Image (cartoon, coloured by chain):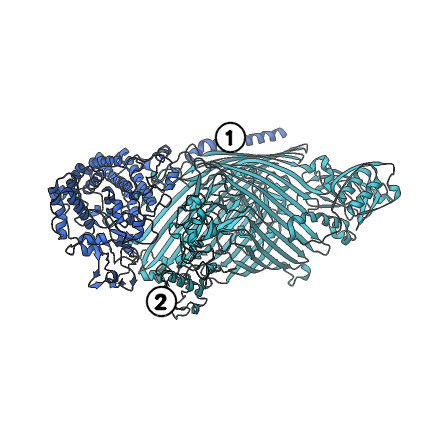
Amino acid sequence: MYEKNKLPGYKQSPGLRIKLIRLKATLLVLGALFASSLYGFSQTFSVNVSNKTLKSVLLSVTKESGYHFIYDNDLLDDQQMVSLTLQNGEINSFLNVLRDKYGIRYRITDKSIALFSTTDRKSPQQGRTIKGRVLDEKGGVLPGTTVRQKGTLQQTVADDKGEFTITLESGSNTLQFSSVGYQVEEVTVGAESDIIVWLKLRVETILDVVAIGYGEVNKRDLTGAVASVNMKEIEKMPVVRVDQMLQGRIAGVDLISTGGDPGAGTTVRIRGTRSINADNEPLYVVDGIIDAGDLNNINPTDIESIQVLKDASSTAIYGSRGANGVIIINTKKGAPGKDVFNYSSEVGVAYLPRFLDMMNAKEYAEMVNENYWFNSPTGTNPPYADPEALGEGTNWTKEVTRTAPYNNHTFSSSGGNTGLRYYLSGNYANQRGIIKASGFERYQGRLNLDKTFSQKVRGGLRLNYSRTKEDLNKIDIGSHAGWWNSTLAIPPTMLVYDEGGEEGGVFEDWNEGWYSGGVINSPVALVELMRHDVTKKNLWTNLFLEYEPIRNLKFKTSFSNTNYFRNESRYEPSSLPRRNFLEAGGYAVKSAYTFEKVLSETTVSYAKSWANDHRFNALGGFTIQKTSGVTQWQRGQGYMVDATEDNNMVAAEKEATVITSNLVETAMVSTLGRLNYDYKRKYYLTFTGRADGASNFPPGKKWAFFPSGAFKWAMLQEPWMRNLRNTLGESSLRLSFGTSGNQAIATYGSQARLTANNNGYLFNGAAPIAYQFANIPNDNLSWETSKQWNAGLDLKLVNERVSLTLDAYSTTTRDLLLTVQLPQQVGFVDRLVNLGKTQNKGLEVLLNTVNVQALSGFKWTSSFTFATNDNKVLDLGPLVRVTTETNYAAPQYYMYGYEVGRPVSGLYGVRYAGTWKTQDEINDWGGSRYVSIPSFYQLGRQRYIDENGDGVLSEADEVYLGQTEPRYQGGLGNNFTYKGFELDVFFHYSLGAKMYNPIEFKQGVGYVGPNQFRYMIDRWHPINNPTSDLPRVNSQDFVATDRFVHDASFVRLGSMRFGYTFNQANMPIKTLQNLSLYVTGTNLYLWTKYNGYDPDVSNNSSSTVRRKDDGVYPKNRTIAFSISTRF
Amino acid sequence: MNDMKKLIKRYVLNLVVLLATVFSLAGCEKFLEENMKNAASPDKFYTSEAEAQAAVNGVYAVLYDIFSNPEFFFAAEGSTDLMVMITERNVNGNFGYSPVAPGVGQEVWKHGFKGVMYANNTISGIKKSALSAEIKDKLVAEATTLRSLYYYILTNTFSDVPYWSEGLQSEDDVNQVIALPRSDADSIRSVLMEELEEYAPYLLEKAEGANIGRITQGFAYGLLARLALTNRNWEKARWAAEQVVNLATDKGIYTLVDYSDIYKIENNKESIFEIQYSYSVTGLQRAHQIYNWCLPTPKDGSKYNGVDLGASSATPYGAVRPTKRLESYYSDIDRRKAHVLASEYNGQEFNRFRSSGRYWLGPKFWDIYANNIASGRNLIFMRYADILLMMAEASIELDELGDAKYYMDLVRNRANIGGVSLTDQSTMREELRKDRGRELAGEFTRKWDIVRWGIFYESIKSVAEDYAAAAGNVRPHNMYYPIPSLEIMKNPALRQNNGY
């Protein structure tokens, strides 16, 4: 980076202005969200002249561009005829042509351009020419290095041999050398005219070195589609899981929270959903530990880099587990030097961003009464004598939600000497849930050691321990199945405490809306009385040793071990209203799960280059892993003494106690290899392959091989692109093709099994052990294979102000591991087979810009991501359509499913056609167009389009209604800094997805049991509202209809951060460094048409049913203050 | 020196490649073998009688999937001429089922074939085992009788169904079974009858002690008799029923008990096969909620429709109600009337009876000790009185009216309604059909009886006054359920029942 504040007269600097103008074109792409001042110049213009004098050329350029030229008449030769073509060029491209072709130098001041002769040199000192050569650390040539004379406009680019010649102007004697991936070097030239400059690899910015599987590569040499996450952008977000920070930050990666409860997971789709039944989640590799699992165990502050491998060329090195993309996370290492201590602390609150628009007690009571009058027109005793007096009633959501505190504290220390370096950190996080009695607490510690034993031998340790405790949510927040005790469905007429009771009194337990009324555990009773928590302890260790017997030949072996313990504990006391009513005593569940994994990986790599033209490196490796998972689970009920909770489970009758246990073991062996070759850093080739053997496939099908290849062309290195090197810092094209797999089927999934059941048939009042067939054997089960093409383009301006990455891909996945519904005459309902084909095609854009970088210190940068994914089922073998989920109460109606030519995440339903308004309409079925369920051919009941015209409403009338995955999604971040101040604003958008709101089947039809969405006050009524297209009271028909399918598009103000970092001069306490104070808000605003809490959630039942909001814990809004310092 | 380095490089590289190859291909096959420890492999099972018995026990468990479902009760009893199930829009009660909304048909199809599959796998596993012939015969007999029961339920529900009887050994077997078309129901029943005849002798004569609830010879012959009656094979039906009568008369295994004891005492001397239930709030729980659908409603405190049933916590739905026809079947002297129909209890009159003169179903269909909706009372499926009436029915059809009167009177005399008049075949047939109704009401036989007698449609038409929806919707083809359309979609070889 060249230092602009040293340019004379910077504010009017033409260089800056031109850059701003040029930026405008980019900014327009980003739309109105960018503020940008406008300039009266056209940024680009075209010149097309042949055999004209230079003077006349300049005249036409003045006309086209608005710039005028000042020059000495002697400068331009009137006799010289010029031919010049420039299409949509910018002024400095034109000027560069003048310089390169005709030896005319220029200087721009505001709208004027002064032209000089290159030979017009007054002083020998200023006119002297310096020759030199640029080399990398190891003595290799560095072609393409930009060489500038500091403080002037003089610059040149080193050629293929790294050689350059620059003529100095008056001004400084300092030359500045910059090359992508290398530290900027400044050399003050003395009397010498021939210099050699070594550039050091830039290691301090992680963005330039990219972790790929089993190694890392200079970003410049990357051949695959790999996205890096800028940790600076996401640090200080008040979340405890790193994936929650990534939403919208990486093009092509779609993250949806499984819920808003603290500790909830995320479902991640990289480049769409490929698999139908097998897992679609990416593979996580943390510090080299494959499939590291739960991200709750990692402190985001410890993370140094995150890379997302997207194309098959990058993921093939992970073979059978790479098909869904790979997320590589590496943690921080110590650097030699003084011990550095960091402390950061975040304190904040979270709360429910909005309440749903449900009826209040008065409106609910009126509706129930209306139903009464429909049934007994002459009745005199409606259920609610005076609805008006009920007013608002109980808002159950308010009763169980709260403003919840959030705390997160991290202390870390790092340092060491060249021999031993360390990074040590500890974290305490406590996030209470916005629903009472839920929350997440974590203690976590990390030790990273790196030891250099000798020049040839190095080793290290990565150790992470975490203990998390989740107080699970105990209540139903609004699911369709739990409607009778969900916060959204319990009638607002029900009181929290017994009649006349006050807080702390006896819980009201009679829900009059549950059919003819019933005793329930109210949500308030549950949060007060019930206990349900999960404690997880996780220890990861990874020991590694590197040996480099001769230069560039490196052996690395690592041994990693994961130990994971999960303990669940749940107790429902006998005092819970419903247990009390049934005299059922207490209910307890206790379970323990132990998971262990050992993984040994050994790689050998070798690098070699010839004549500085051919560079080659090879990697080979062998990995072996074993896992075992042990479960013990027990449940008992009928406990008399609540005080012992689940700690004395023997205190129930034997028959009321259930005990189960399980053991699942897997093994995997792989060999892998990669070859990288490049010619002059211009043409790159990469070949990758991995052979995987996995235990969970049947004999003969255990091994598979996944090859891939990639090609990259660094265009800028071509001689004919040399002129562009003044403008472009990088310009390369990538192309890759490869295969990767998905082996995510259950252990023992191919074997016939007989499982024991002690809960079977009774003989003489006792159940002897029974064994039942649990699985159809399938000797043919094998991997699912994805083939992916990827084409990418990387562009970067030389000043690094704009960088653009474009990727287009097409993935075809075949032999899908598909659970096929079987004809039930075989006694099983489904089986897993390899069948069918899906396709994902998409485009990804990542654009980073520095919009303003002013002398005053003000800097404005933007980051924009955009991704499309077009998902389609290409083949389903003999199947026509596969239903992934049906309506829960009327299973003939499928809601989620897919068919050939449609996306995997398809939504289906019957098209709503309003209500029957007249008897005539009913009699001729609305001109034979509309149908209802048989008993709903009545005024004010809902009707639907009879798609197939058979006069009967059935699943045959269902049509495709859209997909649950977005068509376009991404994010836009803007960061402003000024002296110590920083403002960061991040928007996340997702467009084109649709989703059902399943609670409307009960709560959007005027059903008199549960509370209703407020829109139902506009329901049809023969007198009050005869034209309404919302059905009359009590019109529950369970028809899957587009009336309940909503646009799930949204734009979210995902996060906003404002802070101040003290510099050393104004530091209040001198021993502290880098003291910064921040206030951060997340999920600050949501623009959406969806009528639930949030469209970006999913408690999916299978990996293809996404964006299913069935009582999902709502996302919170968090405001947090943070302080961090170093000393 | 350089050469040396090259040599080392080459050597090391080669070694690594070699090691990797050796490891990956040879040594690893063993490492990658799955050693399943959380479940038994069928290949290594059936090594002892206890193991084989455990697999047979697994075949029984499907009975819960079918019988615990109240919809199955509505289909078998609640949508007949004797009882109606009046809940609005219940497709089983109002004959609203169709191929796309198959009602309980989908569940019977699914679970019936699951029972068949368990039985088939178990039978082939036991047959292939090294167990002694004696053990094999006993256990194969038990599993075969259960398989017959599942096919009996399937054919009664759908008429023709796919028939298969081999264990699933491979994917090919599965592919074959999923493409099977429906087989003729009469032929299936004939096969079942032959099997039952062959295997019945190997079964327990009497289920005692730990075997209470198990399949016995009596049940196998009883089932054979029902199959034979359905196939109008009167000789075989009489022979089969006679085998049970012999067990009663020669060995004293069965006898008629006091009518109230048939539902008050579980697994009594008259019982041949009951679906076993048990419910304790804090202990063993195998519950159904069928009796909740029969309990008088509404409930107000301890009062059910105005009558105090004592300290009951059962939730009443009161949706299954007797028809006028059932009410007309009982004379006032019939000892069964107070058990089947309820106008009052403990001297208190039900509001329904007081206001409209209509009865509730009686204590035979109540479980006032049910916990909310959980009842642990057994469901009666076959008892000795049924055998006697089948004996009588077969005799009437064989025109041996004297014999028929003898067996009918055994049942009638217990009810105190006097002997049947020895008249002509058709009059006695009419009386026998009423006797089956009065005696066996609510015991999962009525719909299948009126179907096999060919009087389904006109019988249902008679309930117009009791439940207009049922009488209005019913069509002759409703005697069988439709094959669920999803099943036809998955197996196009299946053909739909006529009328649907």
Regarding residue A683, the answer to whether it shows in the image is yes
Quarter of the image containing the C terminus of chain B?
top left
| Farthest residue, direction front | A920
Kindly check if marks 2 and 1 are in contact, taking CB atoms under 8 A apart as contact: no
Q: Nearer the viewer, residue B375 or A894?
A: A894
- Residue at image mark 2: A380
User: Residue B18's mark?
Assistant: 1
Q: Quadrant of residue A806?
A: top right
| Disc 1, SS | helix
- Residue A777 picture location, percent across and down: 37, 36
Left or right, residue A142 beside residue A558: right
Chain A image colour: cyan
- Which residue shows up at 22% across the image and 50% down it? B441
Q: Nearer the viewer, mark 2 or mark 1?
A: 2
Task: Answer yes or no: is residue B279 visible.
Answer: no
Shown in blue, the chain is: B
**Amino acid under label 1?**
Leu
Q: CA distance from mark 2 to mark 1?
A: 93 Å
Count of numbered circles in the view = 2
Residue B117 left/right relative to A1079: left
